[in-house]
Image: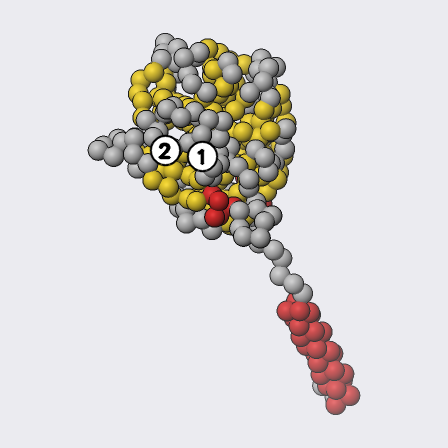
Amino acid sequence: MNSSLRRRSIGVVSACCAATAAAACLLLLLPSPAAAAAVWDLSSYSLEKFLKFKEIGDNASGAAYMPESRTLWVVVNNPPGLFHYDLEGRLLRRLDLPWLADPEDVVYISPDTVAVSEEEPGGGIRLLDVSAWGSGRQVGYIPARNPRWGGVGNEGLAYNPRTKTFYVGQEKAPMRILAIPSEGRDAGSWTTVLDGDAAFQPRGGGGLLTDISAVAYTEARPEQLYVLSQESSRVVRVTMGGQVLEHMHVSGLRPEGLVFTPDGCRMIVISEPNEMAIYRSDGCNGKK
């Protein structure tokens, strides 16, 4: 190779190296893409569908998701009863339960059993047989002895199947979440696991939540809870210690019930008078 050709070749290589280095520097300067929100992160949910229950006139209050049938039991507090729906809002069954005392929430226990929380002082947690032959008969009872006032009592209900513990949301005065064991010597006793007035109403005003209408627990995040407020139309994800991790606004006139599918792909909010909002997580793209 003659000297002139060698100089031209070196120049081309040098220019290519300089361009490559400049591109690498540009990549370093560009902002990194934000990490995608994962299933169970509130920021991953967006509204998929909004339905109304034609058979409920008013007072839809909470829901239990039945994983075996992929259906919901919706509790109505006046007149007391349970309505069985699919996720398209089609009625499957209805159980009239006039003996329940102001039922406010319902949670899945087993394929044939749900638990219902009663709001008023003296009301407890009732285990009901919702099998085809059970007709909603009571098969168990756990007292809820926490002091509370009529109309602002026990609203939300969640269940930890590993520890056999219920988490009960007391609406306000005080706003708090209780742990009530369902088995053993401590069954029916209660302890405060989360002070809602401290966690959701920080000093200086402008609190996130002004009441508690529902509580959801998931084994995927055993040290956290999801808390719904009717008055604030907001869901909060919070640690058991009261640290708020994130929150989001939800649709519905008066949101009263909150439940997730076991895989976390959907979050379902039940609202008075007769509404259901289904949110889908972006982390479940590709799944039905």
Q: Which residue, as the protein is rendered here, is positioned at the far left?
A: 185
Q: Which residue is mark 2?
A: 146
Above-or-below relation of 140 to 164: above
Task: Of the two numbered discs 1 and 2 on the same chain, state the one appearing first in sequence.
Answer: 2
Q: Secondary structure at mark 1?
A: strand
The answer to whether residue 66 is seen in the rendering is no
At 48% across and 30% down in the image, what residue appears?
A: 152
Q: Nearer the viewer, residue 27 or 149?
A: 149
Label 2 sits on what residue type? Answer: Asn
Q: Position of residue 156 (x, y in %)?
A: 46, 31
Q: Secondary structure at mark 2?
A: loop
Is 93 situated above or below 18?
above
In the rendering, at what x and y percent does residue 238 appear?
Answer: 47, 46
Q: Out of 226 and 142, give the one closest to the viewer.
A: 142
In contact (CB < 8 Å): disc 1 and disc 2? yes
Residue 22 visible in rendering: yes
Judging by the rendered image, the residue that carries numbered circle 1 is 170
Residue at 57 percent of width and 46 percent of height: 207
Query: Residue at 59% of width from left, 49% of height from top?
Result: 205
* Residue neighbourhood size for the residue with mark 2, other residues' Cα within 10 Å, grouped as few (<14), some (14–19), many (≥20): many
> Where does the C terminus fall, quadrant-wise?
top right
User: In the displayed structure, would residue 226 be above or below residue 55?
Assistant: below
Quadrant location, the N terminus: bottom right
